Image (cartoon, rainbow, N blue to C red):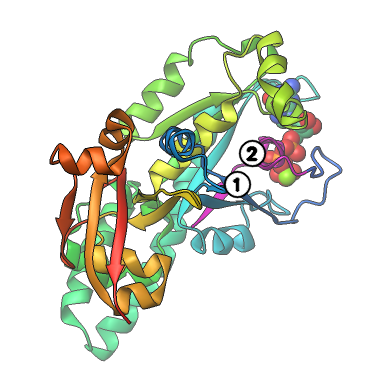
């Protein structure tokens, strides 16, 4: 899973990236404008922590997501950046809400609207070309009909996130990697002195109208926090007036953007979260762990993580009737602790 940090030049993408990953990257106006940074982060998960406390395993493994700082482009959001945006599963728009080095006031709502318009125009461009083809060669009337409706929607300057698609229609256009359809989270990058204050009303309205999630943080401060040794981060954050580093909150929100649930495995060797697509059948989810388990699947033994923590052991869960035996077709649920039985 890959999440792209996007936004206008100087919005703070690279600073946010540094805060998320702890990787030192170049920020500011002298940083290379088209450099793409890539970093893997662990998704904080209190369920994994609770299981680890119960089992004291040799290893603890969290789900991971890759963040990529797509750069600001050489002239704003140029074609190169827009194309790179197509490659990611979800977008986080970093929005400047602090006065820049020259003292220039921020225009966060304008940035939100402008990026939306850019993505709508890029989609329209792509879809119109495709429509022309389909009109010419008459190869796929059903897709043509769908795309023509999409064009109408886009021409009204509405992103495709607000276009209703059936599952079948969604499949039909999945290959186009449309930008205004990608899940989007707004990251409002406020100045140091705004930490802890309410999210400005106009920004909130812009987000609510669009049904978008919002995380407010001060990237520069978060980057300083992230650069500290782990055990000192909480204390340092507190001394700066932060209840907790925003990093964890932000990563969770980004993880929730992509349609994933976490399946859990627990034991004395390892406690681990496995990201699986929402709606995955047990047999497919098993394949995430190992293809042999998918091939030789017999059954899944499932306990809800809360039950396991409350009861204190799998045996007690079985006694209390809280352990279920599920077959191949079972739909994995978020927070299921699972053992797969298989035979190869
Ligand atoms: N005061 C303040 N400055 C910030 C904050 N976040 C970023 N900056 C500064 O704003 C400038 C631009 O930040 P970058 O992270 O380089 O912005 P960017 O979006 O990566 O910019 P490009 O890659 O050039 O498009 C840098 O000088 C940062 O130090 C913040 O929260 N507060
Ligand atoms: Mg940058």
Assess disc 1: are there few (<14), some (14-19) or many (≥20) residues with their C-alpha within 10 Å of its C-alpha. some
Q: Position of residue 146 (x, y in %)?
A: 20, 67
On whether residue 191 falls in the magenta region, the answer is no
Q: Quadrant of ligand 2?
A: top right
Q: Is residue 332 visible?
A: no
Q: Residue at x 66, y 49 (%)?
A: 76
Q: Position of residue 218 (x, y in %)?
A: 64, 23
Q: Which residues, given as a range, are shown in magenta?
A: 1-23
Q: Position of residue 260 (x, y in %)?
A: 35, 51
Instruction: Classify residue 103 by image quadrant.
Output: top right
Q: Secondary structure at mark 2?
A: helix
Nearest the viewer among 278 and 25 is: 278
Q: Position of residue 302 (x, y in %)?
A: 24, 51
Q: State the residue position of label 1.
A: 41
Assess disc 2: are there few (<14), some (14-19) or many (≥20) residues with their C-alpha within 10 Å of its C-alpha. many
The answer to whether residue 218 is left or right of residue 250 is: right
Against 317, residue 225 (above or below) is above
Q: Secondary structure at mark 1?
A: strand
Q: State the residue position of label 2.
A: 20
The answer to whether the residue labelled 2 contacts the one labelled 1, judged by CB atoms less than 8 Å apart, is yes
Q: Looking at the rendering, in which quadrant would you find the C terminus?
A: bottom left
């Amino acid at each position: 899973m890959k999440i792209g940090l996007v936004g206008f030049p100087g919005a703070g993408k690279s600073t946010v990236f540094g805060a998320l990953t702890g990787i030192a990257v170049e920020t500011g106006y002298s940083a290379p404008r088209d450099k793409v940074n890539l970093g893997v982060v662990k998704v904080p998960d209190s369920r994994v922590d609770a299981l680890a406390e119960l089992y004291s395993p040799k290893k603890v493994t969290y789900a991971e997501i890759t963040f990529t700082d797509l750069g600001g482009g050489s002239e704003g959001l140029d074609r190169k950046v827009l194309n790179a945006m197509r490659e990611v599963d979800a977008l986080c728009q970093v929005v400047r809400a602090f006065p820049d080095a020259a003292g220039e006031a921020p225009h966060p709502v304008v940035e939100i609207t402008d990026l939306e318009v850019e993505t709508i125009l890029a989609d329209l461009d792509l879809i119109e070309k495709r429509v022309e083809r389909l009109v010419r060669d008459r190869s796929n009337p059903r897709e043509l009909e769908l795309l023509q409706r999409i064009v109408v929607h886009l021409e009204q300057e509405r992103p495709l996130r607000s276009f209703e698609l059936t599952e079948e229609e969604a499949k039909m256009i999945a290959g186009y990697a449309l930008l205004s359809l990608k899940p989007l989270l707004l990251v409002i990058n406020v100045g140091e002195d705004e930490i802890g204050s309410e999210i400005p009303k106009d920004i909130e309205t812009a987000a609510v109208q669009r049904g978008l999630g919002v995380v407010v943080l001060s990237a520069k401060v978060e980057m300083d926090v992230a650069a500290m040794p782990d055990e000192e981060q909480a204390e340092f954050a507190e001394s700066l007036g932060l209840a907790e580093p925003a990093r964890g909150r932000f990563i969770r929100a980004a993880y929730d953007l992509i349609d994933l649930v976490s399946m859990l495995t627990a034991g004395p060797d390892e406690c681990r979260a496995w990201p699986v697509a929402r709606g995955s059948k047990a047999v497919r989810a098993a394949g995430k762990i190992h293809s042999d388990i998918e091939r030789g699947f017999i059954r899944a033994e499932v306990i809800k993580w809360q039950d396991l923590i409350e009861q204190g052991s799998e045996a007690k869960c079985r006694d209390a009737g809280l352990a279920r035996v599920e077959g191949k077709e079972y739909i994995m649920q978020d927070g299921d602790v699972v053992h797969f039985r298989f035979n190869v």
